[in-house]
Amino acid sequence: STAESNALRTPIVAVLGHVDHGKTTLLDTIRGSAVSEGEAGAITQHIGATAVPLETVSEMAGDLVDPTDFDLPGLLFIDTPGHHSFTTLRSRGGALADIAVVVVDVNDGFQPQTIEALEILQRTGTPFVVAANKIDTTPGWNPNDGRPIQETYEKQSQNARSRLDENLYEIIGDLSDEGFSADLYWRVQNFTKNVGVVPLSAITSEGIPDLLAVLMGLSQRYMKEQMAVDVTGPGAGTVLEVKDERGFGATVDVVLYDGSVRADDEIVVGGIDGPIVTEVRALLQPRPNAEIRVEKRFDKVDEVRAAAGIKIAAPELDDAMAGAPIRVVRDRDIEDVIEEVESELAEIQVSTEEEGVVVKADTLGSLEAMANALREAEVPILRAEVGDVAPRDVAVASTANEEKHRVILGFNVDVLSNAETELDESEVKLFEDDVIYQLVEGYENYVDEIER
Ligand code: GTP
Ligand code: MG
């Protein structure tokens, strides 16, 4: 009933995986739009959020999802870029995503970002399924558009079946090498103990009914308690992106995971120099099945309830940080809310030392992941910040005592043009990469060289 579905919030599903393995195409097919075609080079540059209502889910899933079996309102998918590690998008103390889909190209198999994604899911204890995508590229495959996997599998030639089987067992083997006991999803009894692999094609939609059924089942079965939050209370969310919008100035794209935001709410947002207190000027919601990144015509709404992707326009948001918490004040004491945001920011704060390297990253989550990787490699950090490489960073890096520390490690950030001049004129070295372990490895190789 409506009253019931209002009481449960939408589960948040992160879609992760290596570059080009088909994350955006999969979501396109599910939401029936064509975001991927409109992208520059068809690469997802930013994280986006899409709400898919239960009706759409059950339409696509056909016999596999009976909407009357569910009282969850649908699924909120977060698309992530594969060109760098999605890293930890956090919510209060945990992972922002309730569940995840790791997309793996059946022909390409496991790749660096597949492994990074799995490590993050393991660390955060996020349940996930593996979408073994692009089964339609199996030699000799005869597509049966939109059909469940077992039905289409049975209609394939012996040859096509065994080619696919081989690829699937390789993925199951690779999962096992990463410490996950996995099997084809219909053989999995307990999805919190074993990883289900769903063979599918984002292009022909074969197997997508299965994926949706597994995701709905997983959410309904294991996450119902987590979803039973007060979706009318003061909202809590995580900033995905800070963006300038014509007519609004700096805005934040937010995933609201708890409570609600209203158009007249006071909010506290994590910023580069601490919490920002401001007032909502406009709540801009993409239509259902639309994509927050490309949808130009937002609906101005009065209230949004969790879980949802929402763009918030408000003054003073220029220094808001991707990955930072956002809180609605409403009838609470503002000081308490500021403290809440402060303590959450402090939790993510990277501890720094007197001597070490300078680290810049695009989001708080990636900064945290960089710091973890550097700690493991026993590399001390002098300064760690979210944002592009600025002249100030060059100045700070040049104060390091040791040559090997006079470096800036930039993860998925730009270099401001005046910083480039400074870099040229100083002895500070800049390392950039969009895969964390490659960035750290590149730096370690450099250290080996100068210490030889
Ligand atoms: P990034 O955002 O760059 O990480 O990539 P992505 O994982 O979102 O991949 P995307 O959806 O952009 O797909 C990459 C390419 O693979 C595109 O050319 C898609 O058309 C193609 N592709 C995706 N899924 C399938 C599939 O199931 N079958 C076939 N044949 N091609 C696919
Ligand atoms: Mg993409």
Image (tube, grey):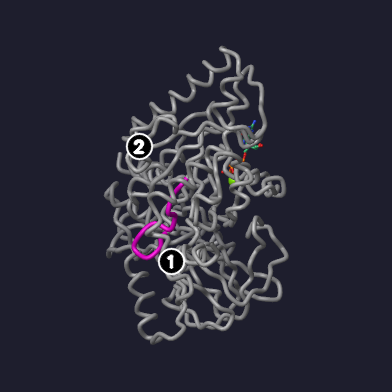
Say if 177 sits above or below 297 in the image.
above
Say if 138 sits above or below 317 in the image.
above
**Tag 1's secondary structure?**
helix
Q: Is the CB of mark 1 within 8 Å of ligand 1?
A: no
Magenta span covers which residues? Answer: 90-100
Circle 2: residue type:
Asn
Residue 145 is inside the magenta segment:
no
> Is 371 positioned to the left or the right of 266 in the image?
left
The residue carrying pointer 1 sits among few (fewer than 14), some (14 to 19) or many (20 or more) residues within 10 Å by Cα, namely some
Give the mark count.
2
Residue 62, percent from left and from top: 61, 40
User: What's the distance in space between the residues labelled 1 and 2, CA to CA?
Assistant: 50 Å
Residue with the mark numbered 1: 395
> Is 298 positioned to the left or the right of 365 in the image?
right
Residue 18, percent from left and from top: 51, 39
- Disc nearer the start of the sequence (1/2): 2
Name the residue nearer the viewer: 338 or 273.
338
Circle 1: residue type:
Ala
Disc sitting over residue 194 in the figure: 2
**Residue 239 visible at all:** no
Name the residue nearer the viewer: 426 or 348.
348
**Residue 128 visible at all:** yes
> Is 452 positioned to the left or the right of 4 in the image?
left
Q: Residue at x 35, y 83 (%)?
A: 336
- For the view shown, which residue lies furthest in the top direction? 158
Q: Residue at x 35, y 70 (%)?
A: 344
Q: Nearer the viewer, mark 1 or mark 2?
A: 2
